[in-house]
Image (cartoon, rainbow, N blue to C red):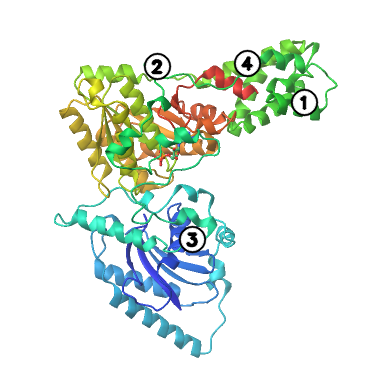
Amino acid sequence: MLDFVVVFTKGGVVLWNSKSNGNTTSPPESTFSSCINGLVRGVILEERNTEAKYYEEDHLAVQFKLDNELDLVYAAVFQKVIKLTYLDSFLAEMQVAFREKFGGIPAAGRLSESYDFDREFKRVLSAAEEASAKQVKAPKAMRSYNESQKSKKTVASMIQDDGKKPVTEKRVNIQETQPQQQAPLSPRSKEEIIAENRRKLREKLTPTKKTSPGDTKASKPSASEKAGKKPRVWDLGGNSKDAVLLDRSKDTPEDVQYQSINSDLVGTMQGVIPDLDVESEDDEANGTECSDEEETEELVQSKKNKRGGGLLSYFKGIVGAKTMTLAELQPALEKMRDHLISKNVAAEIAAKLCDSVASSLEGKQMGTFDSVAGQVKEALTQSLVRILSPKRRIDIIRDALESKRNGRPYTIIFCGVNGVGKSTNLAKICFWLIENDFNVLIAACDTFRAGAVEQLRTHTRHLNALHPATKHNGRTMVQLYEKGYGKDAAGIAMEAIKFAHDTKVDVVLVDTAGRMQDNEPLMRSLSKLIKVNNPDLVLFVGEALVGNEAVDQLVKFNQSLADYSSNENPHIIDGIVLTKFDTIDDKVGAAISMTYITGQPIVFVGTGQTYADLKAINVTAVVNSLMK
Ligand code: GDP
């Protein structure tokens, strides 16, 4: 028996479900929301394994059908142990009936409609069940393997069977990744209907009971919680005192919020962005201590561990009066490559760095360990500095002043996947701009994730409390431009920029919805947002702690912006905000990889959870940290 049937957009907005009018007597729809959420996050949004048309979670299974033309998904949930032979034809009939009743309008244009599909659903279901019953009575020919459910499972779908969630699912949830663009809706009730749809979606997909421990990400905020996200706790993150400042969950009334500000916590940041402070190693100690040729691997390792290790120690055996050959260098270079990879440098880049060190050492006189170590260090430093030195200088203060002189606001758009720290670091950059006497308009263009606007509102209050108008000749230093949820982000950004222009605001910071780099519709809409608003700067926000994944994101964001823009010279990413640098210890490789692959400079580094935790990349410190 079918437990639950639902029609939803590929972005996760539920249009109709079989429970809304009590169509079946099985458990309430919340029982199935986790399974449907899992399907949306792990399969539909990731666009993987969709050919299997089958998904399992705990004791439930979902068979689904995609309507790519209309961007819709038809899904039927049932108990895994039950075999239902009619699902393929049933879902195909559902699709036909749905199209017949509501026309061939793509999903984006459907969000405003109300969907009375109960009668058709009952008709299609009983026809399918009847046909199946007849088949059962008739002598049945054995199904071939190709016709069976099993043949439709891929290895990946079978792996999900054991309860494991897809790796990337932590970044996505239904509300966070709904499509950005919506076709024009009926003027009377457009907003109400979108709001209603969103409310319904939340209700439908919010389990009333607590989900299982491993499934906390799937749960959606309840009505009382939806004003903001729960603060995330970072094991290595700033101290709890600091965290108070950027905790968006405490959206208390304004007067309370203002009084609770402790400006000592945030320090001051004027003029330049302070350099990133990475603990550097004592080079000399590294050189001399490793001169014992008899030293065992274990000893080297234990010394490395005690003192934070030393990349140069791998070259300790290469001493003498000869000239260095590639063959002699090879073992040390391999260890060096592994060392770099262990610091989160992408494998390909680690190999290239080793090649460049090899070519500068080959044919040189060996000499003492100190001299070899010195040469290695010099060669590696040169390569790293070359990588990390921006090919293009980004001077926001200078450019913002220039814009101001020209009577137009300086605009920065922030983009990236969910949860990387876009809003938080946007707020830090806002703080830095205010400290430099620019007033700022924050444009709330994440119109999808529940709580996104409230999060920015809280930051706006904090920032205004730290920099009240009274201290700035009556100028309000930061304002929020918001139009709530469900609207076209590109349009809101455009209105915000116009508002800033008309009211003489110096800088506009545009927050955008998080999106996965492979999600074509969302990448298209980001491209549109950038194209129509022509910002001064597009900043990609990426986490330092994910290493190679951040590189993949950055490359694909850039590629999408280039591919989906109809401009001859598309505006791609100008620079990187590397966040959560405080959580990576000495695994600083993401900085190298991201700049190497894209050639884009790291403009800011986020180093914690206070507004002052914003730094500039310090090339020497990063290089030293890599050598440890
Ligand atoms: P968004 O979804 O990309 O807008 O991400 P948020 O701005 O909501 O940030 C997600 C979480 O990362 C929040 O808990 C932030 O406090 C935290 N966060 C952001 N930047 C940093 C950082 O530089 N260091 C640490 N430790 N946490 C950060």
Question: Marks 3/4: CA distance?
Answer: 54 Å
Provide the residue designation for mark 4: 379
Foreground of the two, 193 or 531: 193
Horizontal side of 209 relative to 378 (left or right) equals: left
Q: Where does the C terminus fall, quadrant-wise?
A: top right
Q: Amino acid at mark 1?
A: Val
Disc 2 or 4, which lies upstream in sequence?
2
Residue at disc 4, CB closer than 8 Å to ligand 1: no
Foreground of the two, 235 or 341: 235
Seen at 45% across and 32% down, the residue is 242
Q: Position of residue 594 (x, y in %)?
A: 50, 30
Question: Marks 3/1: CA distance?
Answer: 48 Å
Question: Marks 2/4: CA distance?
Answer: 30 Å
Provide the residue designation for mark 2: 272
Disc 3 or 2, which lies upstream in sequence?
3
Q: Amino acid at mark 3?
A: Thr
Q: Position of residue 464 (x, y in %)?
A: 28, 30
Question: Marks 4/1: CA distance?
Answer: 23 Å
Disc 3 or 1, which lies upstream in sequence?
3
Q: Amino acid at mark 2?
A: Val
Mark 3 or mark 2, whichever is nearer to me: 3
Mark 3 or mark 4, whichever is nearer to me: 3
Provide the residue designation for mark 3: 211
Q: How many marks?
A: 4
Mark 3 or mark 1, whichever is nearer to me: 3
Horizontal side of 52 relative to 473 (left or right) equals: right
Seen at 38% across and 20% down, the residue is 394
Provide the residue designation for mark 1: 300
Determine the secondary structure under disc 4: helix
| Mark 3 closeness class: few <14, some 14–19, many ≥20 residues within 10 Å | some
User: Where 28 sits versus 200, above or below?
Assistant: below
